Image (cartoon, grey):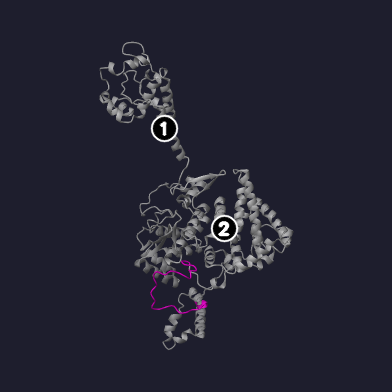
């Protein structure tokens, strides 16, 4: 029974006890002056015949079986301290026990003990508190083992963190994803504080309307109520500890997909809106298409909301075994059902980066790359270095370069060739590192930036131009970094360099970075003038390794919408239609179901007719052919008739155009003169 229960039974309240001498070891006897400790010990138990406390009737054996409470341990400790004069060994053992078990609790327990000056203290029989030296040794060993385990924290996957050379080296997989880093609110709270981010919103407000909470997005009360959409995820196979999954469209969802494709081909936005409102508010491809429309109209809030709804819909269909953080779950981009998830993650990542959450965007970039690291269908390697630098995750970028350089040749990509030495330079500016680490970082940065300038000389002048820096006379007049370096390079390399410069030029504007870059540019020019063999070798690599870019790089450029890089795309990419819900699909796609043939298939219209049909929805070649009769159906394919129909459509458009007069000013003469 605890002291609190005893006080309640006695009718005593905490803080209302009268001060007595019980705590000082000077408890008065029934007839005379205070008794000594030995006298009190002699009069305990057998000398008392009356029972003033009903709980003394509890047998002593029961107290031996139950562990003593904290108050009982405190009483035992006080009684043993009173007897310390007669037995020094017991006092030493009790002091050691008090140091281990009751540090910081003695004062609190002494304050909670009621004074028994008015009532004689009645104590139960306590367990023997003496400990042998062997027991103390075993207990000390157990405590040391516990302390050793606490000094080695482990994560959920059992992967410990080790410290080497004063820097914590993370032994987890390179593409390990943390759930807390997938929430942009956590990053915004670190920047601005929780009150500024949440405002009046409760941090753990329940979403009663939705099925469950998710990791990729946070459901909103304004979203439609979620119900099963006819899409699921299945486990295909497991090979060497890697699990391969695929999204599956059931019959209901396939019918929705067919209606969506018809709406896209008709270029009728209202059909897509009606599909979401009437049939399924969580159809993924329709949400992605509407997001692109809202983004082009500069309604970024609504565009981001559509992307989050698509991610929420797909996460609700995850397989129970599918994990976002393990790094061992794969999705094949060749399957059309899986592409929507890749595209939704990529577009969500771009919104996060523009929103000012580079750390969260980096985590999503790692997630996309972990879904198919071998093929990298969206070419996230062209983006992950920029996000690492913006998020100041320099150690992650250098580690990735060290681990993947041997089998992925990351140094042959201009973005890695320049971003990795920049990361080493930023590491060399951190004061909390040791002098040896700073020196190694400076040497590594100098070595890699010179190799990057030799391998990709066409990056320097556009980079300086975007940064607003005028090069000195020696650099501007030298042919190695001049205009010839940009003209002579192949188109595939131009796409990569333009993409990198357009993205990362803001990271090079720091005066310290520019001073460091200028120093190594002059050293590279000295090597060029000395005809270093490394310069000739780099020129040979540029001419042989960048003949054409793979399809995933084109897909990345199209999704990124970088104007300078898109201008360098080849004709075979720009001549074919690029659909927003499936840009540049793989040539070796794995088709699980096919679309049924349409009763009125579209004709083979040329680019000009498609343009006029986009301007004039009433213009339809098939309708004109049907009106001309069956005998003229074959002649409808003739070029002259096609031109005549286009000219008629042009005249109709010019007739319907109405020009409005500009508003007149009250003061036609004007208030001032033009300069």
Q: Residues within 10 Å of mark 1 (few under 14, many from 20)?
A: few
Segment tinted magenta in the rendering = 580-609
Q: Residue 517: where, in percent of width, then height?
A: 67, 54
Q: Residues within 10 Å of mark 2 (few under 14, many from 20)?
A: some
Q: Which label sits on residue 299? A: none
Is 634 or 611 nearer to us in this picture?
634
Is 526 or 279 nearer to us in this picture?
526
Is 565 or 242 nearer to us in this picture?
242
Q: Is residue 665 visible?
A: no
Left or right of 228, for residue 534: right
Disc 2 to disc 1, C-alpha distance: 51 Å
Q: Residue 393: where, in percent of width, then height?
A: 55, 51
Left or right of 218, for residue 608: right
Q: Which label sits on residue 139? A: 1
Q: Main secondary structure of the magenta part?
A: loop
- The reply to whether the magenta stretch includes residue 590 is yes
Q: Quadrant of the N terminus?
A: top left
- The reply to whether the magenta stretch includes residue 178 is no
Chain-order first, disc 2 or disc 1: 1
Q: Residue at x 53, y 47 (%)?
A: 169
Helix or strand or loop: what does disc 1 sit on? Answer: helix
Q: How many circles with numbers are drawn on the protein? A: 2
Q: Which label sits on residue 405? A: 2
């Amino acid at each position: 029974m605890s002291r609190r229960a005893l006080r309640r039974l006695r009718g005593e309240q905490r803080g209302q006890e009268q001060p007595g001498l019980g705590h000082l070891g000077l408890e008065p006897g029934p007839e005379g002056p205070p008794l000594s400790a030995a006298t009190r010990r002699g009069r305990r138990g057998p000398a008392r015949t009356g029972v003033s406390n009903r709980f003394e009737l509890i047998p002593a054996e029961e107290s031996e079986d139950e562990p003593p409470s904290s108050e009982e341990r405190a009483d035992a400790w006080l009684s043993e301290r009173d007897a310390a004069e007669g037995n020094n060994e017991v006092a030493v053992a009790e002091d050691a026990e008090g140091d281990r078990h009751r540090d910081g609790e003695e004062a609190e327990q002494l304050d909670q003990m009621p004074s028994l000056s008015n009532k004689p203290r009645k104590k139960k029989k306590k367990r023997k508190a003496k400990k042998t030296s062997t027991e103390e040794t075993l207990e000390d060993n157990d405590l040391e083992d516990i302390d050793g385990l606490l000094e080695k924290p482990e994560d959920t996957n059992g992967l410990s963190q080790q410290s080497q050379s004063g820097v914590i080296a993370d032994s987890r997989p390179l593409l390990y994803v943390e759930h807390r880093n997938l929430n942009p609110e956590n990053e915004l709270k670190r920047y601005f504080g929780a009150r500024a981010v949440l405002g009046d919103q409760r941090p753990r407000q329940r979403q009663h309307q939705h099925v469950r909470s998710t990791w990729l997005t946070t459901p909103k009360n304004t979203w439609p109520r979620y119900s099963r959409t006819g899409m699921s995820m299945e486990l295909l196979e497991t090979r060497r500890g890697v699990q391969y999954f695929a999204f599956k469209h059931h019959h209901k969802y396939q019918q929705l997909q067919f209606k969506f494709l018809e709406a896209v081909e008709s270029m009728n936005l209202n059909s897509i809106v009606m599909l979401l409102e009437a049939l399924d508010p969580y159809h993924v491809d329709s949400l992605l298409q509407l997001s692109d429309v809202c983004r082009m109209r500069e309604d970024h809030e609504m565009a981001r909301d559509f992307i989050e709804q698509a991610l929420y819909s797909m996460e609700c269909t995850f397989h129970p075994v599918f994990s976002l953080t393990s790094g061992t779950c794969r999705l094949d981009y060749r399957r059309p059902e899986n592409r929507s998830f890749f595209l939704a993650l990529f577009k969500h990542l771009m919104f996060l980066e523009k929103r000012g959450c580079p750390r969260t965007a980096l985590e999503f970039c790692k997630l996309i790359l972990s879904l198919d690291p071998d093929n990298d269908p969206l070419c996230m390697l062209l983006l992950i270095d920029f996000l690492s630098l913006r998020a100041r995750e320099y150690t992650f970028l250098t580690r990735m370069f060290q681990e993947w350089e041997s089998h992925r040749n990351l140094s042959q990509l201009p973005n890695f060739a320049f971003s990795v030495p920049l990361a080493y330079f930023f590491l060399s500016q951190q004061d909390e590192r040791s002098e040896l680490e700073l020196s190694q970082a400076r040497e590594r940065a100098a070595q890699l930036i010179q190799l990057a300038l030799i391998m990709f000389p066409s990056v320097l002048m556009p980079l300086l131009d975007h940064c607003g820096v005028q090069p000195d006379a020696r650099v501007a007049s030298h042919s190695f970094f001049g205009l010839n370096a940009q003209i002579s390079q192949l188109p595939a390399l131009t796409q990569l360099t333009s993409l990198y410069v357009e993205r990362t030029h803001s990271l090079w504007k720091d005066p310290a970075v520019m001073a460091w870059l200028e120093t190594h540019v002059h050293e590279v020019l000295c090597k060029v003038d000395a005809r270093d063999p490394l310069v000739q070798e780099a020129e040979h690599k540029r001419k042989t390794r960048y003949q054409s870019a793979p399809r995933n790089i084109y897909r990345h450029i199209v999704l990124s919408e970088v104007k300078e890089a898109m201008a360098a795309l080849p004709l075979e990419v720009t001549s074919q239609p690029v659909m927003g819900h499936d840009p540049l699909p793989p040539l070796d796609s794995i088709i699980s179901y096919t679309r049924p043939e349409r009763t009125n298939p579209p004709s083979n219209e040329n680019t000009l007719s498609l343009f006029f049909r986009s301007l004039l929805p009433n213009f339809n070649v098939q309708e004109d052919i049907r009106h001309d009769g069956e005998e003229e159906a074959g002649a409808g394919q003739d070029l002259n008739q096609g031109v005549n129909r286009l000219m008629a459509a042009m005249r109709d458009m010019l007739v319907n155009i109405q020009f409005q007069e500009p508003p007149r000013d009250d003061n036609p003469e004007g208030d001032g003169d033009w300069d």
